[in-house]
Each structure stands twice: as structure tokens, then as C-alpha cells.
Amino acid sequence: MKDYDIKIRNGREITFFGTSDDTIVVPSTVKFDTDCKRADIEINEEMAVKIGIPNVAEHIELDVAGARIVIRDLTFDRMEIDAKGQITVETENIRGNIDINMAGGKAELIVDGNYRFDKVVKGRNNNIETDIEASPEAPFKVELNGKDSVLRITAK
């Protein structure tokens, strides 16, 4: 499996990590649908959630509302975070492009010092604020989509 579609409702603390042994780790109350190329994971009743997927993925889509998310030890082509409200995303040892999609929301993305990126703003009345220098030559893109939203990027 290389594509993951994950919906988390009521989750406030989400830890998302890569597994080195090609396993998927989810809470026992999860709704889990899978075929040979993709997994749909839906979690409705957990307040603190830990999810592990193989540490190399193509596309990860995470649908959350008002959460603190920790993402570590993952390589991906693209991680798309569809969010409502206010979210904080803290990363550690990741490689890949990050898209954050919001309408009227606020997000903070905390990256470690070796994550090099360029920033892309799409949509209407969106803004990315950062003290970290973004570079068009960087290997990864951080993109904000939607409308009336702010993304703040900071370093650990």
C-alpha cells in the first residue's frame, strides 16, 4: 500500500509515525478499509490517537479538526492535511511535500532544522508567515490552499 486516507474525528492529540517493518498500527476501534494499493482509516471516538504506516508512502491524506499533530519518521511524495479550526503540526525526520487546506483557519507547522522547503500560497486571502528562509530550489513545497487562512511555519 502506498496511499492512505485518514479521517480523525474528536482526536485532539494525534501521533503519526513511520514503521520500518511495513506494518500499519491503528487503535482497535478504527474503521479500516483496504485494497492492495490504498487504505481508508476512520477514527471517531479517540481523544489521543497513534497511527503508524510504512515509513515510505506516496500520498497521505489526513482529515482533522482542531488538533495537535505530531508527524515523525516518514517519507512521502505528498501529505495533504484537510483541517478545520486551529491545528498545530509538529514534524520530525520527514521528507516530502505538505499541503494544508483550510477555510477560515489557523495552522502552525513546526519543522526540524534540516527540512528545506519553498512556500506556495493558493486560494483566496491566505497567508504564510515564516522566519525560516524558503527557497525555490528547495526539494519540498509547503502549500496553503483554501481561503481566509493563515499558516505559520517555525523551526524547533
Image (spheres, rainbow, N blue to C red):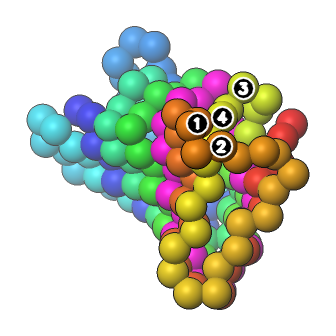
31 up-or-down from 95: above or below: below
Number of residues whose C-alpha sits closer than 10 Å to that of mark 4, classed few (under 14), some (14–19) or many (20 or more): many
Determine contact: label 2, label 4, CB under 8 Å. Answer: yes
**From where the camera sits, is residue 15 visible?**
no
Residue extending farthest to the left is 36
Identity of the amino acid at label 3?
Answer: Asn
Name the residue carrying label 1.
138
Identity of the amino acid at label 4?
Answer: Arg
Image x and y of residue 15, in percent: 63, 41
Q: Specify whether 35 is left or right of 109.
A: left
Identity of the amino acid at label 1?
Answer: Ala
Q: Residue at x 28, y 43 (%)?
A: 3
Q: Which mark is residue 114?
A: 3
Determine contact: label 3, label 1, CB under 8 Å. Answer: no
User: Number of labelled discs?
Assistant: 4
Number of residues whose C-alpha sits closer than 10 Å to that of mark 1, classed few (under 14), some (14–19) or many (20 or more): few
Q: Specify whether 111 is left or right of 49.
A: right
Name the residue carrying label 4.
116
Image x and y of residue 45, in percent: 54, 63
Secondary element at tag 1: loop
Identity of the amino acid at label 2?
Answer: Ser
Determine contact: label 1, label 2, CB under 8 Å. Answer: yes
Q: Residue at x 34, y 53 (%)?
A: 5
**Which tag is nearer the camera, tag 2 or tag 4?**
2
Whole-angstrom CA distance, mark 1 to mark 4, is: 5 Å
Of the image marks 2 and 4, the number of the one nearer the N terminus: 4
**Which tag is nearer the camera, tag 1 or tag 4?**
1
Determine contact: label 1, label 4, CB under 8 Å. Answer: yes
Determine contact: label 4, label 3, CB under 8 Å. Answer: yes
Q: Which mark is residue 135?
A: 2
Determine contact: label 2, label 3, CB under 8 Å. Answer: no
Whole-angstrom CA distance, mark 3 to mark 1, is: 11 Å
